[in-house]
Image: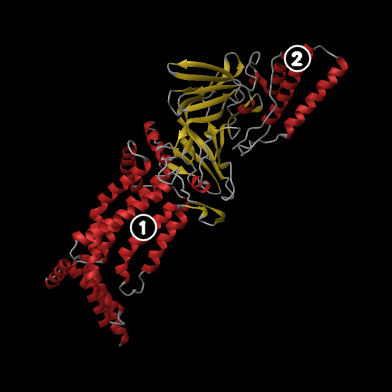
Amino acid sequence: MEKNKFDVNSLIGFVLIGAILVWMLYLQKPSDEEIQAEKQTTEAASNQKAASQSTESDAISLGGATQEMTDARATDSLAVEELKNRLGSFAYSGTLPSAKENVTVLENDVLYLEIKNKGGYIEEARLKQHNTFDSIPVYLIKDGNASFNLQFSAENRLLNTENLFFEPTLSQNGDNQVLSMKLKTSENAFIEYRYELSPNDYMLDFSIRSQGVEGVLDTSQPMYLDWRLQGYRHAKSITYENRYSRLAYEYEDESFDKLSPTGEDTETEKDVNWMNFRQHFFSSMLLTDTPFKEVQFTSIDLVEDEEVDTLYTKQYRAKMLLEPKAGGLAYDMNMYYGPTDYQIFKQYDRNLDEAMPLGWGIFGAINKYIIIPLFGFLSGFLPAGIAIICMTILVKLLLSPVQYKQYLSQAKMKILKPEIDEIREKYEGNQMKIQQETMKLQSIAGASPLKGCLPALLQIPVFYALFTFFPTAFDLRQESFLWAEDLSSYDTIAELPFHIPFYGDHVSLFPILASIAIFAYMMMTMGQSMQAQQQPGMPNMKFLMYLSPLFMLVFFNNYASGLSLYYLTSNLITIGIMLVIKNFILDEDKIHMRIQENKKKPKKQNKFQRKMAEMMEQAEQQKKTGKR
């Protein structure tokens, strides 16, 4: 999956070192022991020279890939002196036991981490219980796609910790694994990264502290923590995954914001509590107990052509301004590497669920307090596909009273059609009078079109909440149903030898079936409306009847098959409910008799109806006056 990069500079460096060694052998013909010692010294000196050149750079490349440098094996006094000359006090490490490209492993049942000596940051983060769409383990960090760098000034030098060696110490705190990474200026003076990982947990404690370096750190110059990451692709659909990969963050007041998911977006924000480099179903997060005073966020969309296979989806960066305390550093933080799962996020009670696109306002509330708990309960003992069907049935039954009122209003309008046709014929050419008399008839019969629209509007929050739920439902990931291998991605019944814009290079069956069901439903609901003549200013119902199924067919071809399964089930149930209401509950003859009885009774108009009638009468009078 990953691509190996050829480093020309490293190759040239090794060639030069080899040439020097051959020349020394030719002139001095030393013993084997002397040759080995000289090789180690030369390699260490070359490595530290490259490190010093990197620390003198003013900016860190936004690409996120750490600079590859020759492997140091500094074990003698000459290497120590070279480091001190180049990097000052922060090169101190006694005999430099950490000045090797070694790593320390922290792991539990769900998370595997490798922390490297050089830089002291996580160079590999693997989720042990999850795989990508092509059965490769899910790596959030691997092969230099991330960097975590503390930039500060000391002894008239601008230093970057990603180029310096930390000394690791691994210990236990109860059942927790603790790793202390110390960047030393002396035995008792250092900057420390401290990692603590609990069993069966995706979140680890992380802190940055300093001790005894108050006279070395130049606190008059700004200190930055620079975190960069290129998000690996994990899903089958690049388009779908990239749409839901986004940089999100929370302010100190618990308000929430995010960068654009497309193009390049940069924002500088104040007082930030946490940030999430979201990769659709997986998240890399940094949380702090002391809000960062200022953070510069950057997000770049790396998917230039969705038809071409890609390794990365997004490029993220957060450059955080750190505030010194008593001449040193003291920040308590947390790191999270794991699923973008609402149920897991809620366990931490840190408002992390705001990082998920569950919808705003009432839509998000419906998801959080109804849809997610209901689906979580059903999927606890049912296969995911069956759980979707059962949830859809329950939702439709819950909304059936609303749908009954909607269909009752449509039936009344159908019964009134002959009388409305008479009004149109009687006042042909006088559209204002037709509308006035039609409204009067509908008011007397209790068959206002508004009564048919309101029930439909009441269902919109539920429909939209479900629309936002399925793309974020981690429980659907890699769950199969019928011909769909993964309900969180599209199903495929045929591969196309070409790519169709907006549609893709495959054919999904669930969207096709859902489109047919939607068309049948709209034929039932709009068919009777289209029997009447099309009124000026009204939408073309026939056009809408074809537009919705077409939209489902085209744009849902790349969406999660679980969402298409929901729409298919929902419309089939709706058609069934409407047939039951029409054939077994509603009696059109009785409705007609009731309408005729209502017409004989004096009907009291409400304030709105009276106002509308007055306005239409005034318009009619003005029209007559104008004709005279």
Q: Which residue is mark 2?
A: 37
Quarter assignment of residue 250: top left
> Which badge, 1 or 2, comes first in the chain's sequence?
2
Looking at the rendered image, the quarter that the C terminus falls into is bottom left
Which of the numbered marks, if any, corresponds to residue 517? 1
Q: Residues within 10 Å of mark 2 (few under 14, many from 20)?
A: few
Which of the numbered marks, if any, corresponds to residue 531? none
Query: What's under tag 2, amino acid-wise?
Result: Ala
Secondary structure under the numbered disc 2 in the rendered image: helix
In depth, the one of 379 and 232 nearer the eye is: 379
In this picture the colour scheme is secondary structure
**Is residue 27 visible from the viewing direction of this image?**
yes
Looking at the rendered image, the quarter that the N terminus falls into is top right
Would you say the residues marked 1 and 2 are in contact, meaning their CB atoms lie under 8 Å apart?
Answer: no
Relative to 14, is 590 on the left or the right?
left
In this rendering, is residue 164 above or below 141? above
> Percent x, y for residue 3?
63, 37
> Percent x, y for residue 613?
23, 72
In depth, the one of 3 and 284 nearer the eye is: 3
Q: Residues within 10 Å of mark 1 (few under 14, many from 20)?
A: many
Name the residue at the right extreme.
27
In depth, the one of 294 and 139 nearer the eye is: 139
Quarter assignment of residue 575: bottom left
Query: What's under tag 1, amino acid-wise?
Result: Ala
How many dots with numbers?
2
